[in-house]
Amino acid sequence: MLTAVEARRLVEQARSELIELTQALIKTPTPNPPGQEEQAAWILKSKYDAEGLKAELIPESRGRANIVTRLPGTGMAPSLLYDGHLDTVGPGDESAWTDPPYSGIIKDGRLWGRGASDMKAGVAAEAMAAILAYRAGIELAGDLIVASTCGEEMDNLGAHTLRNTGQLKGVGGIIIAEPSANELFIAEKGTLWVEITTFGRTSHGSAPHMGINAVEKMLDLLADLRYFRPSDDKHPLLGEGTASLNILNGGFKTNVVPDRCTAIFDIRTVPGRSHQDIVTALKTKLEQAHTADKDFRAELKVIKDLPSVSTPESDNLVRLAQTVSRELWNREAKVGGISGYTDAAVLTPGTNIPFLIFGPGEMATAHQSNEYVDIEKLTDATVFLLLLAATWGR
Ligand SMILES: [Zn+2]
């Protein structure tokens, strides 16, 4: 069986190859929208092809594709899925970057560029772990599947495709290489985006009594929702749920009474109260407002709904990850939770498949200008993922 020392040696030998692959992915812009991940998927495909590893490009729409490769195991254990997303957020204000956002430049032991942390380094580490396992002829107990997906930053497009095309069949554990600075996250908050629209009737701005002002109706409602919290639940790793009013749109002309106003809430939840229950509570508020004021008319739409998901700390996958981190670093990795969502919220609900978030990037640098990944963390993560795959099911 592969030892920690051997795993280190294999990754050390492939160090420049790993760095070059990460750089190539960073230098291939995939800001979402629009995504356009296909070119990045092809970089991985040609890498797998050159190795003799079969890889399937799963197209989404023009210019967009997922890439999945599978190393067969002996069938003694369920499959292990390494998942990561190929898209990134946009670069934002490019003048805020010291080097251009897609430079992939190396400075101070770090690799810089949009997606370095979130999560092209994670994608490269997962792919290289599989390539090195294959190259060294390491016998795996379960199949190792590496899936690099589209669209995580918007609607988890690729994760839905993985689920819908049966790629999760026989999978007994999922690693998502989102930025965790090589620690372990085993829980993530749920995401519930709610759009509320109030309706009124336009009139001339000089005769407001002739119309119904949708913005003013919204302000009445917002006064009631000002301290809305999704639940009183508390989670040991996730803390409490939150609600934030992040978009408010209403009115179009100074001399016209507005007939429409929209408010969008970003609600983040912890296990406990269901999303359906939270939506019902909000709808009740709208009904109460209508009962109190017949001119109040509003509609509520859920525009994103991903549940909070978690893996018990006692799960074998978490234990195995701790064993691997002890062997590599002489300490157990820290276990925590995150407030954002990952592909796990699409891949795991209703499946009982445990997942872990483990990746070389740092949350603090993700989605920021001057995003980077530490090269040491990148190589360490690759060693970890190689050893974990080799130890899985043993
Ligand atoms: Zn991400």
Image: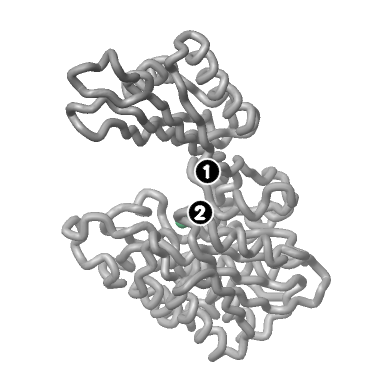
Give whichever of 181, 207 is nearer the camera.
207
Residue 250 location (% of width, % of height): 31, 31
Give whichever of 345, 236 is nearer the camera.
345
Quadrant hosting residue 33: bottom left
How far apart marks 2 and 1 lie (CA) works out to 8 Å
Q: Of helix, strand and loop, which one carries label 1? A: strand
Give whichever of 269, 256 is nearer the camera.
256
Which residue in the protein does label 1 denote?
A: 304
Quadrant hosting residue 102: bottom left
Residue 132 location (% of width, % of height): 58, 80
Q: Which amino acid, mark 1?
A: Lys
The quadrant of the picture occupied by the N terminus is bottom right
Disc number at residue 155?
A: 2
Q: Residue at x 46, y 35 (%)?
A: 195
Q: Of helix, strand and loop, which one carries label 2? A: loop
The quadrant of the picture occupied by the C terminus is bottom right
